[in-house]
Image (cartoon, helix red, strand yellow):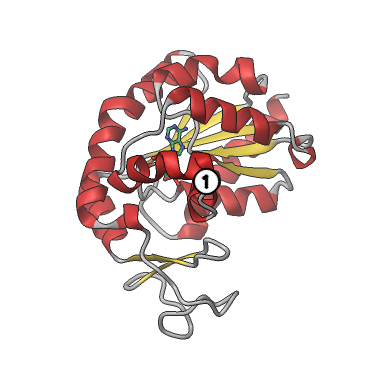
Amino acid sequence: MKIVLLGGPGAGKGTQSKIISEKFQIAHISTGEILRRAMEQQTEIGKQVEHIMNEGNLVPDQLAIDILKDRIAQKDCERGFVLDGFPRTLKQAEILEEVVGKIDKIIYISVPDEYVIKRMSGRYTCPQCEAMYHMEYNRPERSGYCNLCNVELVQREDDRIRTVQNRLRVFHELTKPIVDYFENKNMLVEINGIGEINTITNLIAMAVDQTQQEV
Ligand code: AMP
């Protein structure tokens, strides 16, 4: 089972990808998460991309493709995976199936920009497990600390308002065209990303189940 979750910043693709990967027991591949780890560990790649990511811009296509190739070769991807954050440009979309094989379903979680800005400006993340919380919609049990790790929550640099606005601009300019690209290939299912996390998970799971029946 190979699934791609597409969506703009703050559409909930990270949250949903994690839930879906557990539900269907497939790997969760987040190119953003791999890049953030590289930044934290200050590897060569991490140092190279720090500025790009903090500004909300995209890292070069070839780097994202190489990261994906490496990740896909790991054992936990054998049963399938959810791709979260790749592809992000037409070039990445065109090369996708060459790199990872046939994709079963592409799910686009759509959310209007106004909503994204509201959502993302209150978002806090656990630096250890990447669990997400929100000051308004999803508060941690102990204020400021992760429910799972008890580690102090942080606001991701790329969740700050100015960066969010740039990420939205980048999304519309570079990533949105791939929604049409996959739609024309009849591979896309669009899901409304406004609502309870559970409701949206169910909609995604239904689309995945339907794919399994078609296979
Ligand atoms: P995400 O966690 O998916 O929101 O990604 C965070 C950041 O990582 C993005 O804003 C980009 O700077 C970078 N990134 C992640 N995936 C890709 C990709 N496929 N292509 C280019 N940049 C990416």
Q: Is residue 20 left or right of residue 144?
A: right
Asked whether 163 or 51 is in front, the reply is 51
Give the image location of residue 71, x and y in percent. Answer: 66, 36
Task: Give the residue at mark 1.
Answer: 203
Residue 212 is drawn in which quadrant?
Answer: top right
Residue at image x 43%, y 39%?
48
Is residue 60 visible to us here?
yes
Vertical comparison of 204 with 161: above or below: above
- Point out the residue furthest to the bottom here: 142
Q: Is residue 62 above or below residue 154?
A: above
Position in image of residue 179 (x %, y %): 39, 25
The picture places residue 213, in percent across and down from the top left corner, at 71, 30
Q: Could you tell me the amino acid type at mark 1?
A: Leu
Q: Residue at x 78, y 34 (%)?
A: 78
- Seen from the viewer's position, the closer of residues 41 and 101 is 41
Determine whether 61 is above or below 122 in the image.
above
Residue drawn at x 38%, y 47% is 11
User: In the image, what residue occupies the spot 43% across and 60% down?
Assistant: 196
Front residue of 88 and 111: 88
Is residue 80 left or right of 52 when viewed as pictured?
right
Q: Residues within 10 Å of mark 1 (few under 14, many from 20)?
A: some
User: In this picture, is 146 found above or below 99?
Assistant: below
